[in-house]
Image (tube, coloured by chain):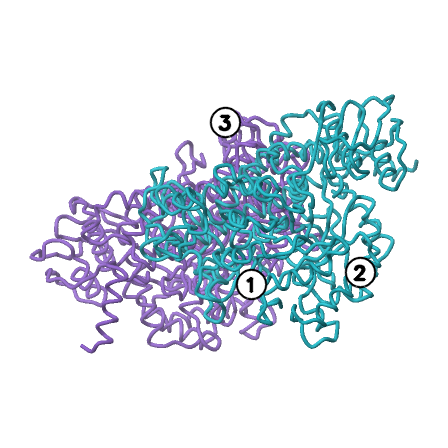
Chain colours: A purple, B cyan
């Protein structure tokens, strides 16, 4: 060894005893080859993957023989599996692979490997990538697309293929079995032959991990790339075009999954452009896909620039269509009726559509929750939605039960998450954003999982060494941060049911003052908070927009009454006087101030917790998160100051002297959030 | 009244019942004409001013007759006066004017007008303006010069004359009786005929208020504007040039005061350029000024780029000259041995020069104390210096006693303050910076005054209406802020004796990391804090630079011993190990962290106090101060984060988990403070 090498080695060892971690391995760290044996009579790419995972991920007795076998056990459905001691049984090979990941996880978490029977809550567990063909990602905060690169997105390298493989593996390890490769604001070009060839390459690469490939399609594709004069779904030529296109796709990609469609929404083309309905549009595509068992995921995220309360529009437009869709169509509904806000009540469509399958759409990427700059663990938000009771078929009709087939038979069930994945080395920009990808997969598999349990799993796999997996203090410090983080964000961004106070465009910082006569009112902040000298909030009770009518009793009455409406949704449903007394005994203005301040103090608490981990976490990830928490703290203060100083202009009240004073001037924040550099 | 006017009136009244205040009136607000009578047999400009002040400032019984008369009462010296009921007696007319201001002040503060005998501590109470002839002000944070404007600074308008009048009046009201009109880094041009003509105009304007005019002179003036080849003070032509120049000045300005000279300091020319001494230089000028009773104020702020500890140099250079100066020379010494830091021990020259009069130089403008962006009441810092015991002639030999004539006879005594005055409407940029101007005047008049008493006077005159002058809550809230403010600044900038951690050039923000091999070491921060793996601080004990030797016993030994050295000067005199235990029980690192955090929390406390005053203070001044406190809070956080994160690189210790975490990354602050926009 020459001297330089020795010096370098000394430096490396001297700086840290902890292994450098760049986050690329996600929750699949600590893989080393072992001599565990695997016994199976099966042979395929997927089985080979399962065997490799077992050998490299094993942390038990190396003399064990693990058995993998298929069975038609009635307890197992779809991709389900059972684990008993060293035996994994499943209906499908993919089920066996899932069983392997579960076995390794249980082992790593030091949990028993007995009497495990696991079936997925949803048959289709799908990531939506809002990736554009130019490589950019709409609302992506972790670098460019891992799918689309080079001219027209058509290029790829061996590195890219390796990345797709690792992507598929990570998804398989948490049970995700489908992926939509391109943005819902779709370029028609994705259906060109050249692009389909590339899709084929991706689909082939990820298939052994059980991932099906889907595409977002532009409703005007027959015109834009087909040379037709119309995209009218009742036009025979148009229908034929889609049939032929679908046949072309399946010839190239036999296990293709189907289409995701954003139609007649935010400027996207759709059947209404031709006087037709969503049903006409969706069924046309469904007819083309049906022979191949392909599906249509038709988004219900629609709203028009009308005076009607925006949160009511999807329900009004889609409920009349209930039962009219073909059986390979599923309607994809965002968790809340607005747009992925830090807190929304569940979308009333979940409690209304009885004859059409509905799939929840969750947003993993943190468009409205601090991008990849802020630590916000989203699982509690999703759990809150899934466990919300719609009362559709009486008490207990949770969003979960309304969508996972419990309350109605459907040909299939599904759930989607808008991915937070990009080409950054750690995939998600923020180390803790990996937890949201992880949690989406785990909840899609088991929609009754508890967020704290998911956090516990993720923390141990992500931060602890195999040997240290019982380090309770470390896990608790991190878990406390994660479990409080979404409520903290709600507090410093928009507590008590406030929503959409974001700065225009970037949706990162605050702009409750934002209004612009040149754009539709429901794209401004003042439309939503309706602050005035009397109070704050959007009256959606029977005396207001009556959005409450879209909810089932007794929830409707609970929400409608200012005194029974849960306070976390208070300003969503009511215009509340500044001096209205809340359950805390504080009036609205005082409570609002305290909540905003609490949010800031919570982030300060996260900083304290995290800093205590300096000796435990590898330096790279420690400093990355430490630095981002600092940013989050500064930005939480900006949120607090912006909102309190702005709303104070209406309340005309002092900020309670018990809490910290603003450190920013309102005018300065207004300028700051306008600046292109802000965020 | 038309409708619009009515609406506007309603709006104005609705917004505030408080009178708008732009701060121009300083502590001389609430003047209204009264019918009080004044009885005197004197008649002059000054007496007329006194009568007018009485009539407009009177707040007692309007039927009173106030008597003004001169007397040679032995209790009165110089500008002193006595007040008894309605009679003011003084030795001079200026003394009567001072007596009038005192009478009005006592009345306003509701104090008795009986048995008041007041004599000034210093005969000469002088402001130094660091104003350049181009109108800029070195270390000025309140706009351009009120003296120098237009081409070469020669222009003036009736507005300027009015401003000079108001300037003179404000100074007279607190006993200031001299002003140096231009920067100590002096342009020789100020001695040109054209400039002297302008000086005459200023001098004539301010003379009725008792203000004498002085000029800073460039030692090379004979060369620069006199056409001589040398400025050697022993050269007969040079001596003649100065004699003639002085005669010319006195012909134009018979009550001219004299010269202020910065020589052989920071690049300024001086007698050492010709192998002569400070004595040679000063005495040459003194000889020229002597026939007219003019004086020379010769600055001792000298240091050279030698390895010698910079804080020792002035003492070493001047002490050997003690007793050699002519009797119309006074040596002007900064309060501390370095340069107006947030906290310094007193300059050892105060306790050493026995045969040469010394005048303290205090800095009113907040070069190192947050400019006009931060609320820092400097009186406690000056009081700390004036009351420091030098032990020169035994216990009780305070800096005050060493300089005000108590301990040694001198032809005259003096004190100087570097002004914070500019053309801003409120004179000083920050409303609370007015208090520093006020306090300097009051301490120059009476160097045993207590800072809290001065604050009390200033607050009542500045913020309260005549009728509300007993509003104890308001006064207490403001006084608490003021009295804590300097200690807060020390805490968040440089506690425990740290000094000169400022960013290069602007001296506003932190840069403890600052070092630059291209400049002299004593212009960098690392020269002063000497952080290393062992500890922090500059060893000036006998084992180090031995600066302690310049102090008299028993102080020398007290400072020299790490265990007896007052903790506020600990890192000034000692290189202290990180784990050294302080009186609090904390070790150095922990205590340092806590002090920095305390500073930030103190500013947050100021914000709380100030916000409580919203209903009491007029809106303009309320919002100005509120906004500046916000800036101060943000910048205190930057200071704290910068210093702790930087010193942590040496201590390699955790920041105690009891205190708030940094919210900035060190690299980001380093970039920020380099930026031209920062401050």
Depth order, front residue of A319/A39: A39
Residue A427 in view in this figure: yes
Of label 1 and label 2, which has the lower sequence position?
Answer: 2
Name the spot of residue A42 as percent of width and height, x first. Answer: 16, 63
Left or right: where does residue A13 sit relative to residue B596?
Answer: left
Place residue B622 in its image quadrant.
top right
Q: Residues within 10 Å of mark 3 (few under 14, many from 20)?
A: few
Residue B420: image location, x then y, percent: 67, 50
Of the pair B367 and B165, the residue shown nearer to us: B165
Q: Which residue is mark 1?
A: B675
Q: CA distance from mark 1 to mark 3?
A: 47 Å
**Residue B416 x/y as whole percent:** 65, 49
Which residue, given by chain and number where applicable, does mark 2 sit on? Answer: B249
On the same chain: label 1 and label 2?
Answer: yes
Mark 3 residue element: loop
Give the x, y percent position of residue B118.
70, 32
Image height of A472 relative to A192, above or below: above
In the rendered structure, find residue A584 and report the number of the disc placed on it.
3
Q: Nearer the viewer, residue B166 or A300?
A: B166
- Report crowding for label 1: few under 14, some 14 to 19, many 20 or more residues within 10 A (C-alpha): few
Cα separation between marks 1 and 2: 45 Å
Point out the residue furthest to the right here: B1
Tell me, yes or no, if residue B669 can be seen here: no
Give the alpha-carbon distance from disc 3 to disc 2, as whole Å. Answer: 76 Å
Chain identity of mark 3: A
Judge left or right: residue B373 versus residue A216. right
Do residues under tags 1 and 2 come within 8 Å of each other at their CB atoms? no
């Amino acid at each position: 060894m020459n001297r330089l090498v020795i010096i370098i080695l000394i430096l490396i060892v001297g700086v840290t005893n902890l292994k450098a971690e760049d986050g690329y391995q996600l929750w699949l760290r600590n893989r080393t080859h072992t001599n565990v044996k695997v016994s199976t009579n099966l042979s395929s790419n997927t089985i080979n993957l399962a065997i490799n995972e077992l050998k490299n991920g094993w942390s038990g007795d190396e003399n064990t023989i693990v058995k993998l076998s298929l069975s038609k056990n009635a307890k197992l459905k779809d991709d389900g599996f059972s684990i008993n001691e060293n035996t994994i049984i499943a209906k499908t090979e993919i089920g066996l692979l899932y069983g392997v990941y579960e076995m390794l996880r249980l082992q790593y978490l030091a949990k028993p490997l007995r009497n495990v029977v696991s079936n997925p809550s949803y048959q289709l567990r799908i990531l939506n990538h809002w990736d554009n063909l130019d490589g950019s990602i709409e609302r992506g905060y972790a670098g460019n697309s891992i799918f689309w690169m080079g001219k027209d997105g058509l290029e790829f390298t061996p590195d890219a293929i390796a990345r797709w493989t690792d992507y598929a593996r990570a998804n398989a390890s948490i049970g995700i079995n489908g992926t939509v490769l391109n943005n819902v604001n779709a370029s028609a070009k994705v259906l060109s032959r050249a692009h389909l060839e590339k899709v084929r390459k991706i689909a082939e690469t990820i298939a052994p991990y059980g991932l099906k490939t889907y595409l977002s399609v532009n409703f005007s594709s027959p015109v834009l790339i087909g040379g037709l004069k119309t995209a009218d779904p009742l036009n025979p030529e148009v229908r034929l075009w889609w049939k032929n296109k679908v046949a072309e796709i399946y010839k190239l990609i036999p296990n293709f999954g189907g289409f995701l469609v954003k139609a007649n929404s935010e400027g996207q083309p759709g059947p209404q452009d031709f006087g037709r309905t969503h049903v006409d549009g969706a069924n046309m595509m469904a007819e083309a896909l049906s022979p191949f068992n392909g599906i249509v995921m038709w988004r219900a995220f629609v709203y028009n620039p009308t005076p009607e309360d925006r949160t009511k529009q999807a329900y009004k437009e889609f409920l009349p269509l209930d039962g009219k869709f073909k059986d390979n169509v599923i309607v994809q509904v965002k968790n809340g009726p607005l747009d992925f806000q830090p807190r929304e009540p569940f979308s009333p469509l979940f409690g209304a559509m009885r004859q059409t399958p509905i799939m929840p759409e969750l947003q993993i990427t943190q468009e409205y929750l601090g991008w990849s700059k802020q630590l916000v663990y989203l699982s509690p938000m999703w759990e809150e939605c899934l466990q919300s009771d719609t009362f559709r078929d009486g008490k207990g009709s949770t969003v979960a039960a309304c969508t996972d087939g419990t309350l109605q038979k459907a040909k299939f069930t599904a759930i989607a998450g808008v991915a937070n994945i990009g080409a950054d080395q750690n995939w998600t920009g923020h180390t803790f954003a990996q937890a949201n990808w992880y949690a989406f997969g785990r909840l899609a598999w088991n929609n009754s999982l508890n967020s704290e349990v998911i956090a516990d799993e993720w923390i141990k796999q992500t931060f602890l060494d195999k040997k240290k997996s019982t380090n309770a203090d470390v896990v608790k410090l991190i878990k406390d941060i994660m479990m409080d983080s979404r409520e903290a964000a709600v507090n410093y961004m928009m507590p008590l049911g406030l929503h959409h106070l974001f700065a225009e465009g970037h949706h990162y910082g605050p702009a409750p003052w934002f209004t612009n006569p040149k754009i539709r009112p429901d794209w401004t902040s003042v439309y939503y908070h309706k602050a005035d000298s009397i109070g704050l909030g959007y009256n959606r009770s029977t005396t207001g927009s009556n959005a409450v009518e879209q909810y089932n009793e007794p929830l409707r009455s609970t929400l409608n009454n200012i005194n029974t409406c849960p306070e976390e949704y208070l300003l969503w449903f009511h215009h509340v006087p500044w001096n209205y007394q809340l359950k805390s005994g504080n009036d609205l203005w005082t409570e609002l101030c305290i909540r905003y301040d609490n949010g800031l103090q919570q982030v300060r608490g996260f900083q304290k917790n995290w800093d205590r981990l300096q000796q435990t976490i590898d330096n790279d990830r420690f400093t990355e998160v430490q630095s981002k928490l600092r940013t989050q703290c500064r930005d939480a203060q900006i949120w607090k100051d912006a909102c309190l100083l702005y709303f104070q202009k209406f309340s005309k009240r002092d900020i309670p002297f018990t809490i910290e004073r603003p450190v920013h001037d309102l005018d300065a924040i207004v300028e700051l959030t306008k600046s292109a550099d802000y965020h």
